């Protein structure tokens, strides 16, 4: 499957119009799984559903004309970043209408998207904290982005970043601790 998606990406970039449709078929289920991972604890009828997240993400991925796709994992890493941006933009729009007090301490593993003001503020705080973390240690920020927003496994992240799974696990713990402290502030 790796070579198939990678080859479809390359073919699409080189002007093969039919590759776009075949690519959609090849990645749809996995993108849906990533989106479902992010949306699985949501109440029914949420205004941002799994399908909408997948479609918006895919449209933005396909619009990446300047990206030289290296592999299937590179594609899904970009999907993780785009899903993060979509969810944070959603949260920002949600809180633009109402401004409330500070968000309480919450564990990174427990954050989930909902229509609540509190959750929207948490996503914005997480995005701000991730931006700060990226300035200090870009790799830690990528591990969080790929794991939290992309639902990637330690093994997939390790392969993508050319690290050992043990290093990814250690980075994940370190990043969660740093983000918890940053978000408490």
Image (tube, helix red, strand yellow):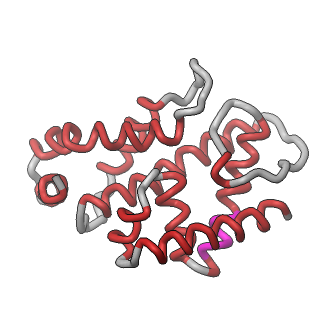
Magenta residues, dominant SS class: helix
The residue furthest right is 101
Q: Residue at x 73, y 40 (%)?
A: 119
Residue 72, given in percent of the width and then of the height, sits at 25, 58
In the image, taking residue 168 as reference, residue 61 lies left or right, namely left
Q: Is residue 48 above or below residue 31?
A: above
- Return the residue nearer the eye: 180 or 84: 180
- Return the residue nearer the eye: 149 or 88: 149
Q: Is residue 76 magenta?
A: no
Residue 92 in which image quadrant: top right
Residue 79, given in percent of the width and then of the height, sits at 40, 52
Q: How many marks?
A: 0
The residue furthest top is 45
Magenta stretch: give its range.
129-134
Residue 13, given in percent of the width and then of the height, sits at 18, 58
Q: Residue at x 48, y 48 (%)?
A: 83
Q: Residue at x 67, y 46 (%)?
A: 110
| Quadrant where the image shows the C terminus | bottom right
The residue furthest bottom is 136
Q: Residue at x 59, y 24 (%)?
A: 46
Residue 120, given in percent of the width and then of the height, sits at 71, 41
Q: Is residue 36 above or below residue 1?
A: above
Q: Is residue 65 above or below residue 164?
A: above
- Return the residue nearer the eye: 157 or 4: 157
């Amino acid at each position: 499957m790796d070579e198939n998606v990678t080859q479809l990406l390359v073919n699409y970039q080189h002007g093969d119009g039919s590759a776009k449709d075949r690519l959609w078929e090849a990645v749809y289920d996995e993108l849906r799984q990533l989106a479902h991972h992010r949306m699985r604890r949501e109440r029914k009828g949420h205004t941002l559903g799994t399908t909408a997240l997948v479609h918006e993400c895919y449209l933005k991925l396909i619009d990446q004309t300047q990206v030289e796709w290296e592999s299937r994992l590179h594609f899904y890493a970009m999907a993780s970043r785009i899903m993060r941006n979509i969810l944070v933009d959603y949260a920002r729009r949600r809180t633009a209408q109402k401004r409330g007090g500070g968000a309480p301490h919450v564990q990174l593993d427990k954050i989930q998207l909902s229509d609540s003001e509190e959750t929207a503020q948490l996503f914005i705080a997480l995005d701000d904290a991730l931006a700060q973390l990226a300035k200090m240690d870009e790799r830690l920020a990528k591990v969080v982005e790929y794991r939290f927003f992309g639902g990637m496994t330690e093994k997939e992240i390790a392969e993508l970043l050319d690290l050992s799974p043990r290093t990814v696990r250690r980075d994940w713990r370190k990043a969660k601790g740093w983000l918890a402290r940053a978000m408490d502030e």
